[in-house]
Image (cartoon, grey):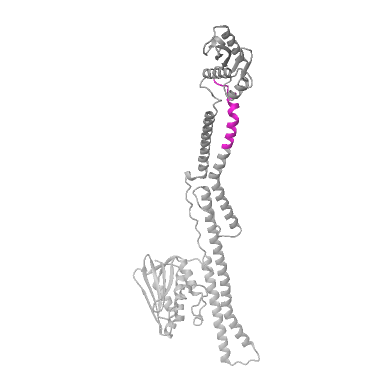
Amino acid sequence: MSEAATLHTPTLPRQVWYRSLYWRVAVGFVGFLAVLLLAQGALFVWMARNTGGLFPATSNARLAQLVASDVRDRLEDDPQLDLAAHISTEYGRSAQPFVVVMIDGRSFTNRRVIPPALLRNARAALTRVTTGRPLVRPRRIGAAAGGGGNFVPVVVNSEIVGLVAVPAGSPPLVNVISELGPTMAISGLVLLAIGAATSAALVFGPVRRRLGELEAAARRLGAGDVTARASEHGADEVASLARSFNRMAADLQARVEALAAADQARRQLLADVSHELMTPLTAMRGYVETLAMAELRLDASMRERYLHIVDEETRRLERIVGDLLDLARLEGGGASLKHEPVPVAALFDRVATRYDREFTERSITFARRVDSGAETVKGDLDRLEQVLQNLAANALRHLPDGGSLSMIAARYGSGVRVTVRDNGPGIAPEHLPLIFDRFYKADAARATGGSGLGLSIVKTIVDAHGGTISARNEDGAVFEVTLPA
């Protein structure tokens, strides 16, 4: 079963204030208002320049003189002129109201309704002018002549035929609004719509697109596609959200892959355990059934041989179950390890004591050495002895008679390295990466005495001590175990 991978979520970069989405929205809004005001001002100036009838003179006195001169010239050219139509056409858009009163009692204005006070003042001024000395050229009649305002007589062929009256002060605001209001309102709405659409496209368009991509990635992830990722382009809140989503998706993908690997390893483990347990059980059943046959006569030596085989298979089954229990306790945390000083020489002595008889019977040379600085390691005495016993047993299963086995402890950095070396046939290169897997046997035909769990237990114990183990070939098999000093 594969080891669970440790998942680590990296720290997300800190948000920079000037790259914030809210900052972009605020700047975009202020910029939009500024552009809108500039456009409105430019439009107003353009309209003022291109609508001369709105402000035809720089002052009220100048307007009065302009209208009086224009009416005079028109009447001289055409005495039957429709003065009402002419004034409406030429001055209908002027914001400043004025009135033209004639000697015959007619009155005309550029607005729809003649202001009553202005009409009274104009008629009074005309009466005063016509009863006095005739004017040769137009001049401004002051307050004494007509009471507040600008009054200019209309003189045709040296005869006063009327008078133009323009009130003092600025044009009434209602007149300016009535002329410019509709155009400015429509243009303002158009500019507002264009500005809003432009701001939405420039500010919110990319955000909306990226949020759509993030939503699509979330839907794919929810549908089971653990490879779904969102675009991390940008440095605002949306990009930060996308990065968080991608980290979550990556963690989820790693967990899914770890669970799949664990499930596959569990299935493989069950298959391997079933196979390993079935082998001795099948042998035991066959021999027991043979011994139970009443019609089959077995001599004492044959019966003893069969019982010996059953005993060996029983012990083999017991070893497999014991190894599995050891692995379960070590990996599940059920076996607590001691952390105390352990003499390395004592570990070597225990190995020598256990296998002394086999060394003698098979003429195997066992050498051991503890260098200076490597006398003690930190760990659990019983478990570390199990490591060396399993490594020795593994070497002895492959060593030919008359071979040699050595164990050397030497200082290695801040720890101690224990080297177990034999001069046997070694390990085939294709098997080296797999020898610490459960139930793996480099040579199943020769290693019939092993369960395939010994080296797995060795690696689990070494890892639990915070050490490392490796294997290589060098004139035989070499195992190197590094442990804390």
Q: Position of residue 389 (x, y in %)?
A: 45, 75
Q: Does residue 182 show up magenta in the picture?
A: yes
Residue 473's quadrant in the figure?
bottom left
In percent of the image, x 45 and y 66: which residue is there?
A: 465
Q: Give the range drawn in magenta.
A: 170-191
Residue 284's quadrant in the figure?
bottom right
Q: Position of residue 466 (x, y in %)?
A: 44, 65
Q: Hey, which residue is sitting farthest front in the picture?
A: 77
Residue 171's quadrant in the figure?
top right
In percent of the image, x 55 and y 85: which residue is there?
A: 309
Q: Is residue 163 visible?
A: yes
Q: Is residue 180 left or right of residue 405?
A: right
Q: Does residue 387 show up magenta in the picture?
A: no
Relative to 132, say whether 451 is above or below: below
Relative to 190, say whether 369 is above or below: below
Q: Hey, which residue is sitting farthest left in the picture?
A: 372
Main structural element of the magenta stretch: helix, strand or loop? helix
Relative to 46, say whether 404 is above or below: below
How many badges with numbers are in the image? Answer: 0
